[in-house]
Image: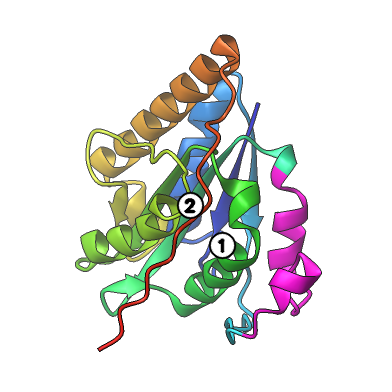
Amino acid sequence: MKVLLINGSPHKQGCTYTALAEAARALEGMGIETEIYQLGAGPVQPCNGCGGCRKLGKCVFDDGVNEIAARADSFDGLIVGAPVYYGGPCGQIQCFLDRLFYSAAGRLAGKPAAAVVSCRRGGASAAFQRLNMYFQMCNMPVVSSQYWNQVHGNTPQEVAQDLEGLQTMRTLAQNMAFLLKCRAESGEPLPVYEPKIATNFIR
């Protein structure tokens, strides 16, 4: 079993990474393999709504989005981390997830998922809600913790002092591992869903 953790921060080993690394260590301690994927500091192409992924089976912009989509069968759970910018997740991770979920939602369905956010002071709950919307639209069980998955601090050293936040990461890891192991032991297949109905409201 493996959990992919996406670090949506432009800082490779900053505050968001510190939170994700705490969860990853706890998962590894419970026998779950982990990988932290660094999004990077470069620009991420936003989705332009072209619909090309419907024809190609992948996003028309060939970057990390297609890499993760192609590897979807190699991981069993997903944790997405992001810093808070102006009360919401940073733009890079939103562009990345818009395209990933638009082009590859079917490959992610059924995988337990969780969001993690990092902020200096405020905006964490709004950013946390925004990230969870991706999972809730795509048939991904959302893994919870003892509190909303957030850490506070302006530097990794300050995050290391957020003892409640780090404990929340470890509890999140425990719940993720529990769910993955329960599913593996049960052998229960994923549900077979009805064809999706899209209702457009015209006024």
Task: From the viewer's perspective, tell me whether residue 174 is left or right of residue 109.
Answer: left
Q: Is residue 151 visible?
A: yes
For mark 1, does the 10 Å Cα neighbourhood hold few (<14), some (14 to 19), or many (20 or more) residues? some
Q: Is residue 165 above or below residue 30?
A: below
**Measured from the top left, where is residue 38 in percent x and y?**
63, 60
Identity, as a three-letter code, of the amino acid under mark 2: Cys
Name the residue at 59% across, 23% down: 189
Task: State the quadrant of the N terminus.
Answer: top right
Mark 2 and mark 1: span between their CA atoms? 8 Å
Q: Name the secondary structure under disc 1.
A: helix
Q: Is residue 18 above or below residue 53?
A: above
Q: Is residue 153 visible?
A: no
Q: Are marks 2 and 1 in contact (CB under 8 Å)?
A: yes
**Measured from the top left, where is residue 13 in percent x and y?**
55, 59
Quarter of image, res 50: bottom right
Residue assigned mark 1: 101
**Measured from the top left, where is residue 9 in percent x and y?**
51, 67
Magenta stretch bounds: 50-72
Task: State the quadrant of the C terminus.
Answer: bottom left
Q: Residue furthest front?
A: 203
Mark number for residue 138? 2
Task: Compare residues 166 and 69 and report the one nearer the observer.
Answer: 69
Task: From the viewer's perspective, tell me whether residue 174 is left or right of residue 47.
Answer: left
Task: Compare residues 58 and 67 and report the one nearer the observer.
Answer: 58
Name the residue at 58% across, 70% down: 96
- Magenta stretch containing residue 53, yes or no? yes
Mark toward the start of the polypeptide (2 vs 1): 1
- Magenta stretch containing residue 55, yes or no? yes
Identity, as a three-letter code, of the amino acid under mark 1: Phe
For mark 2, does the 10 Å Cα neighbourhood hold few (<14), some (14 to 19), or many (20 or more) residues? some
Task: Compare residues 180 and 40 and report the one nearer the observer.
Answer: 180
Quarter of image, res 55: bottom right
